[in-house]
Image: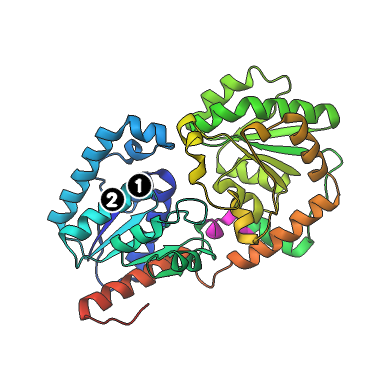
């Protein structure tokens, strides 16, 4: 059975590798994986058409700057898939690229089975993309419990909630098990602030100065404070360069194990708004979020229609964690907010209660990769036999 993958960044590569492992385990026939993938998918036997690092860009400005090359890669991918004729095409995230591939393939081969994993965040901005997704794919697999209803409301394709891959993270499972046995953590006498300025060069460059001033202000208010900054290896040189000007410096740690240890031990976090906010919520880590868009995206900020940009807030259904954007990123304000979150206050207790609710909503009966593999194989079987019943 030939399964093609179309994706464009590291996080999607990890999702694809997990899905591919479960497809191999669950399928009654051998799986031949083709298309696009990264290091994790190569370990599962996929030889990528080209290096997906070329597609791993963020911000409208960066996309426009590299548009000619992106269009070339898009056409190359479509031509490859048309020639290969896989039984199933799986697109993962990176809507701007992957859905264009799916749409072109759909136009050329209307009966192709195309399944999307990680639909666009229509709940945050540009809800019209739900209809574009519906025109290009047969089914979508969602990572968040609120997404199937949101897609249906805006004319999206049939959708299933399979759960977020983070729920299969062993480090997180140990934190959740500890909390279940011991109850919510109290703030420490000598508190630790977790500092997470992002994993991409652009967001790090835009946030590090703000985070440095906030950490210095908070350190002046809390003399026993220590800071821990988990750094992704590829951007550590930029982080070290920025840290040189910080008046008070945190401990920088490397690797997943050190990161999750910090998640387990810190008292609160100052983080760039993004997927890490969900990790923090599931780890029951009180947080304040901040973000600065790139200049082009900032000019187009009116396209953002969601009432929040924070995943914990969407899942909770109310403004659980505070968000600070652009002019609202004021170090003295952030420091005072974090001080309240790092001590046993009503603000800290409210976030902790909300995180318990998020954990309940995110829990699924089977591993996300296993659920996704089951649905994809079922769709392929129905396609082969001509069955029309929904999954």
Q: Which quadrant: the C terminus?
A: bottom left
Q: State the residue position of label 2.
A: 100
Relative side of 338 to 91, left or right = right
User: Crowding at label 1, few (<14), some or many (≥20) Cα neighbours within 10 Å?
Assistant: few
Q: Is residue 171 magenta?
A: yes
- Colour setting: rainbow
Q: Position of residue 173 (x, y in %)?
A: 62, 59
Above or below, 183 against 197 in this view is: below
Instruction: Report if residue 125 is visible in the image.
Output: yes
Q: Position of residue 93 (x, y in %)?
A: 40, 52
Secondary structure of the residue carrying numbered label 2: helix
| Residue at image coords 85%, 30% | 221
| Residue at image coords 34%, 63% | 134
Q: State the residue position of label 1.
A: 96
Q: Position of residue 128 (x, y in %)?
A: 41, 56
Secondary structure of the residue carrying numbered label 1: helix
Contact (Cβ within 8 Å) of mark 1 with mark 2: yes
Stretch of the chain drawn in magenta? 166-173
| Residue at image coords 47%, 64% | 368
User: Crowding at label 2, few (<14), some or many (≥20) Cα neighbours within 10 Å?
Assistant: some
Q: Is residue 74 magenta?
A: no
Q: Quadrant of residue 154?
A: bottom left
**Depth order, front residue of 145/374:** 145
Residue at the extreme left: 83
């Amino acid at each position: 059975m030939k399964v093609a993958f179309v994706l464009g960044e590291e996080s999607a590569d990890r999702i694809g590798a997990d899905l591919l492992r479960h497809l191999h385990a669950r399928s009654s026939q051998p799986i031949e994986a083709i298309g696009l993938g990264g290091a994790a998918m190569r370990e599962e036997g996929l030889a990528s058409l080209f290096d997906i690092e070329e597609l791993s860009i963020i911000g409208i400005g960066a996309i426009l700057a590299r548009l000619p090359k992106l269009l070339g890669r898009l056409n190359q991918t479509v031509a490859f898939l048309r020639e290969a004729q896989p039984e199933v095409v799986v697109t993962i995230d990176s809507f701007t690229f992957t859905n264009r591939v799916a749409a072109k393939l759909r136009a050329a081969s209307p009966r192709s089975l195309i399944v999307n994993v990680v639909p666009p965040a229509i709940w945050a901005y540009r809800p019209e993309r739900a209809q574009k997704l519906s025109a290009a794919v047969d089914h979508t697999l969602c990572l968040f419990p609120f997404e199937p209803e949101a897609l249906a409301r805006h004319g999206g394709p049939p959708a299933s909630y399979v759960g977020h891959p983070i729920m299969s993270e062993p480090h997180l499972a140990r934190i959740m098990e500890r909390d279940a046995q011991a109850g919510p953590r109290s703030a420490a006498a000598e508190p630790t602030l977790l500092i997470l300025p992002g994993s991409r060069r652009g967001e790090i460059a835009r946030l590090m100065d703000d985070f440095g001033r906030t950490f210095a202000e908070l350190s002046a208010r809390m003399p026993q404070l220590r800071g821990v900054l988990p750094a992704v290896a590829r951007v550590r040189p930029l982080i070290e360069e920025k840290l040189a000007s910080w008046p008070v410096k945190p401990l920088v740690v490397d690797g997943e194990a050190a990161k999750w240890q910090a998640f387990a031990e810190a008292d609160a976090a100052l983080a760039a708004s993004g997927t890490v906010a969900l990790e923090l919520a599931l780890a029951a880590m009180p947080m304040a979020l901040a973000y600065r868009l790139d200049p082009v995206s900032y000019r187009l900020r009116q396209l953002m229609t969601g009432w929040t940009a924070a995943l914990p807030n969407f899942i909770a259904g109310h403004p659980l964690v505070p968000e600070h954007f652009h002019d609202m990123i004021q170090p003295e304000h952030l420091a005072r907010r974090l001080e309240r979150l790092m001590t046993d206050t009503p603000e800290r207790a409210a976030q902790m209660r909300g995180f318990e609710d998020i954990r309940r909503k995110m829990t699924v009966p089977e591993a996300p990769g296993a659920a996704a593999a089951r649905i994809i194989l079922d769709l392929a079987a129905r396609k082969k036999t001509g069955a029309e019943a929904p999954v």
